[in-house]
Image (cartoon, rainbow, N blue to C red):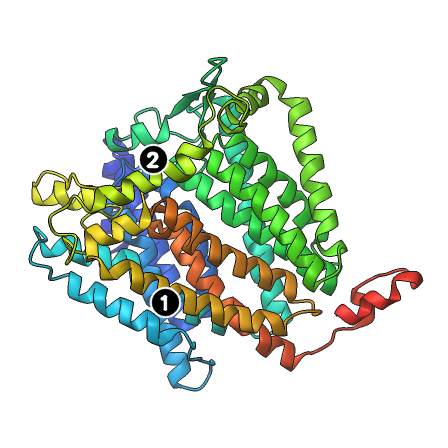
Amino acid sequence: MGLWLAYEIGRKIAVGDLNSLVFITLGFIVCAVAVTILRNWRAGFYSFLTWLLFEDLVRKYMGNNTVLFFGKDVLAFLTYLSLFAAVRAGREKAFRPKFLLFLTIFVWLGLMQIFNPHSPHVLYGILGFKIYFFYVPMMYVGYALIRTDEDLRKFLVMNAVLAGIIAALGIAQAIMGHSFLNPSNLAPELRELGELDKYSPLTNQILSLPTAVFVSSGRFANYLIIAIILVLGTAGYLLLYTRRNRKLIFAATAIVGAAILFSGSRGAVMYGAISALVLSVGFLWGAPWKAIRRSLIGAVLGLAAVILIFPTQVASRLAFYGETLLPNSSAYELTHRGWEYPIQNLMLAFTNPNWVLGNGIGLASLGSQYVSKLLGQPPFTLWVEEGYGQLIIEMGIVAPFLWIAWTAALLYSMWQVLKGLRQTRFFPIGFAIFWYAFLLLYPSTYGGLAPYQNYVDNAYLWLLVGVFFALPGVLAAAPSVPAIANPVRTKRRADLSFV
């Protein structure tokens, strides 16, 4: 076998078939990670998380090979199997969320919609069901993952490091142009997503939209929203728990904040600013002000440094944001994009003759163009950029009501838990997760289902939901930590009550 592999690899090197060599290498890596996950799902989980975020980068350089798109799903499925075996053997804990009934009803609707008679092919339904529900079991992974403060710290710091790296790469690409982190021959179906430029409507200044490690600027912008919420929540938790990794988190906060400015995405800028404001108010309600003060100072200093170092690149983005978001601008678009356009798209959903029963799950979802290409069919043309309208098109008029039911049940259950975390070290990260779930399931859904259907946002949602519901158990097991872990001055000794 060794001689045969040497011969085959040597032959591919000789003919310059480097893509095959990369596939062989990736195959070995996936097999090694799969074995690790099956032996110890905790050890393999972080490999899955890293691949989840960097899979698009490999796809870009491998010609958008669709086989790579399922790598994360294979690792996730193996993680589910390994965790299930551990739970059955009594080595890991499981839980039954209170919102499960409402979620199950929505899942059954999605399952029935796979076989909707108006759907042109069952593959659309399988794709849609996978997009909506494949990462739901990730909440059980998140719940079992966090057993102690150290587990939580490791998970949050790992996410902050990945966020800092990805944000820094996005900043570099915004400054250096699309040639950075993009192959010279980008796949045709990715070129429009990965090489986008915008112009400020009044001053006509050009700004390139960075994609960082992702295939589209939209996915990068959506990830930055997750990142800024998580790093702010992480900073609050660490400030109330331990001295470790604080400087790293502050640096990550500054880098992510700067990346949001460079993203060219008005949604990322608006949601990032609103999130910082909401988390500030929330922390004042349930945790000391210092839980976010230093993080905000770090973010402001990072933005100031970027503006001073790269004034030209920043100027075009500030012009674009100001000219389209400020009410006194003649190119003001916030009202149109925030209200008129979504409502028009919602009304458009009712022009479809099948709006009562829908056309089938997945038919208007992300990735449906690949199914159309595989089947040799023209893409489905009736698609709306409004989340509830898209639910009506795919699953009928009952779908938005069931969506609101299960999401409201989820947020209500989280709120009940969050109130019990007040005045503890877990409140900042708990409130951050609660806010992210609300942001994704309501405002973002109103704007369109693309963020929820995006695998990064979806996987993080369910993973963080599991982490959230694990926090009370960690608090009960270790209700207090040593006072030395939270250095405070004598006149601020009262702050120790929050530990």
Residue 400: image location, x then y, percent: 29, 58
Residue 222: image location, x then y, percent: 44, 44
Which quadrant does the N terminus fall into? Answer: bottom left
Residue holding disc 2: 61
Nearer the viewer's eye, disc 1 or disc 2? 1
- In the rendered structure, the answer to whether residue 386 lies left or right of residue 395 reads right
Q: Earlier in the sequence, mark 1 or mark 2?
A: 2
**Foreground pick, 149 / 222:** 222
Tell me the residue at 61%/51% (across/down).
278
Residue holding disc 1: 406
**Foreground pick, 100 / 66:** 100
Q: The residue under label 1 is which amino acid type?
A: Trp
Tell me the residue at 34%/35% (across/down).
61
**Foreground pick, 329 / 248:** 329
Which numbered disc covers residue 337? none
Tell me the residue at 22%/45% (across/down).
349
